[in-house]
Image (cartoon, helix red, strand yellow):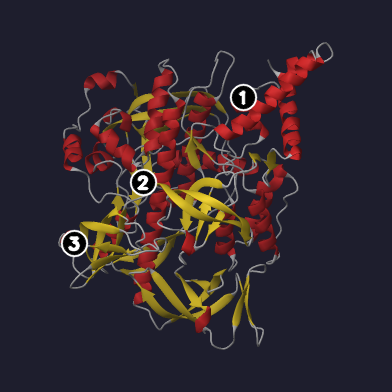
Amino acid sequence: MHLSTIMVKKKKNPSRVAKLHKQMEYDMLKLFEETGNKELNYKQVCSKLGISDQFTRTLVQDMLDDLAERGDLQLTDNGKYRRKASIAYAEGKVDMLGSGNAFVIVEGMDDIFVHASKVNSAMHNDRVKVFLYGKKKGNHVEGEIVEVLERARTEFVGTLEVSAKYAFLIPDSNNVNTDIFVPLKDLNGGKSGDKAVVRINQWPEKSKNPVGEVIRVLGRKGENETEIHAILAEYGFPIEFPKHVEAEAAKIPFEIPASEIKNRKDFRGVTTFTIDPVDAKDFDDALSISMLKNGRWEIGVHIADVSFYVPEGSVLDKEAYDRATSVYLVDRVVPMLPEKLSNGVCSLRPNEDKLCYSAVFEMDDDCHIHAQWFGRTVIHSIRRFTYEEAQKVIETGKGDLAEEIGVFHRLATHMRKHRFASGALRVEQSEVKFKLDNKGKPYDVYFKESKEANWLIEEFMLLANKKVAAFVGKKDEKQKDVKTFVYRIHDQPNDTKLKELKRFVSTFGYKIDLNNPKTISASLNKMLNDIKGKPEADMIENLTIRSMAKAIYSTENIGHYGLAFDYYTHFTSPIRRYPDVMVHRLLERYLNGGKSVNAKDYEIKCRHSSDMEKKAADAERSSVKYKQVEYLEERVGEEFDGVITGVTEWGIYVEIIENKCEGMVRLRSMDDDFYVFDEKNYTVHGKKYGKTYRLGDKVRILVKAANVEKRQIDFEMI
């Protein structure tokens, strides 16, 4: 019985109402326990309890406030609720620090500080049981790890040190605070100075070091192939495909069966083209355009039909799911699918018939959509543009398909303006790129910036993603339940982090209005626009991104805050992202009248995809850092202008303006004064002479050292 019904009967049977009210409180508290004490707002509570009418939803909000006042729940800074912890033990994930200390991250609680002496055998990202002490370390409750519940990993990458009687692996990662003992019999050909992968087999009780065996020798440290393979191994990405997977891919023919073409909408006679980076080989998406008799445009967003070639549950599918994403390192792509598929059969190469899954829109010049269609198609791209070629056509109005590209450009510009006016965030960062010699060594650094050609593709991919998500996710009058789907979600920013960002940017004279939730994004966009061209721009953009929640995949749709979309998914890159393959399969299933799939199964797949996406991003950043260190290795002793991007108790981070290489000036190397860290004001200042260094300051530095093995750059302040 809904609370709205209860309240109607309140006067007739007050005791029954009180009992039902208590039952509702119990259901709410139980919900928080069953969801692992996740933070939930009142809308999420209503959704999970099946409450949809506005009257009852308002009552739920009042009851949550009552429970918070009573002390059963805690109201967090971002307007959500969580169950108060009243236990001596908690379970969470270890975040290991370089010092050997750690934090245990427990969902719904503040992070728990663990001193290095109390970490025991736990390692970074392990799931552990932690005992909570009554005392605090700064702002954090202190604890001791008493049990490792689940190891995050057992294989580690590092450099071997071999002596006459024993050997150790010195891990590359700063988050691993112990060396791994390797018996000589388990070196498997590894020599001192080799990079290797070691698997931990045991951790003897009361022993400081775990014991492992070498399972793969990567090569000599410092060599390009060795270091790149070490990065991939560090984040759990395979270097090559298993032979049985390659063999399965080799069986797939390039020729499209005539019977398959008959079952699809044929777009081969419609003007179709692709726009991609100059070095791209995996063409996921193509655009088509034609003028309809009513004067409107028929716009086709055509996406490679990977699901046709990769049946669910097949050898290729299992390998693609495990990888979940392609990894884009500085000097190579590690694809999700074998090259036969990623660069060949599935890739929408010009002058070839290709199978696609398409989103087709009837659109007028004001970007109003009058009709839409989703389904399987066959296309024939007549031109492959690079972004630079398409940009030239936009700027000059001349060249191949100039009229068609001009129409797309006008429509994309209109959609982009509308998106930002609706509250989408405008964060645009330049990408660091390297020119490499034939040995993989960087000899030049440049920046890749998005222009109109990039925005053109972006807007139409966003349109397809948004409309596909809304098509499945929006519940109409005929539907009893919303079908399970894979969404790309982005939660609202954390209120505490936004306040911290506001305080920080105010030191530079910028303002953010946090008073009205509806205008926060507009205020952030104004601030981001104001900082353009300023020395502090990159740093503030990075801090703004960090203040935001991370976009993830989920079956529970909460919308996408950064894009200001109520419904959003990833439909447009199935060659390089596994969630897009899932979306294609689910869309096909529901178009054919199929029943909803199991939400729990797909939530597990979403979580795996989100985890692998983060690992891929970390691997990409590691490869960029490696090349930056290599680049500066040849420039030790040279001076550069830089901007302070971070201050800590042990040093000042500086980013070189001309190449975006970041290094550290260690406080102990600054011998002109005794410098101390002021966390509150983001500064480092000298005790004797009062010289102050703050975030955003321009400084002159000298490259003191560049350590390729540790991927570490040391600067000296001039």
Compare residues 303 and 388 and report the one nearer the observer.
303
Q: Kindly identify the residue that appears in the image at 54 percent across and 15 percent down.
A: 479
Tell me the distance, in whole angstroms, between the alpha carbons under discs 1 and 2: 51 Å
Name the kind of residue labelled 3 in the image.
Answer: Leu
Q: Residue furthest front?
A: 206
Residue of label 3: 187
Q: Tags 1 and 3 in contact by the CB under 8 Å rule?
A: no
The residue singled out by tag 1 in the image is 49
Give the residue displayed 30% in from the left and 28% down from the top. Answer: 312
The residue nearer to you, when weighing 215 against 521, is: 215
Q: Callout 1: helix, strand or loop?
A: helix
Residue farthest to the top, as pictured: 12
Q: Dot 1: within a 10 Å radius of its alpha carbon, few (fewer than 14), some, or many (20 or more) residues?
A: few
- Frontmost of labels 3 and 2 is 3
Left or right: 287, with 343 as reference point: right
For marks 1 and 3, give the CA distance: 56 Å
Decide which of tag 3 and tag 2 comes sooner along the chain.
Answer: 3
Along the viewing direction, whichever of 605 and 132 lies nearer the viewer: 132
SS at badge 3: loop
Circle 1: residue type: Leu
Amino acid type shown at disc 2: Phe
Where residue 272 appears, as percent x and y from the top left, is: 37, 35
Q: Which residue is mark 2?
A: 385
Whether 655 is drawn above or below 673: the answer is above
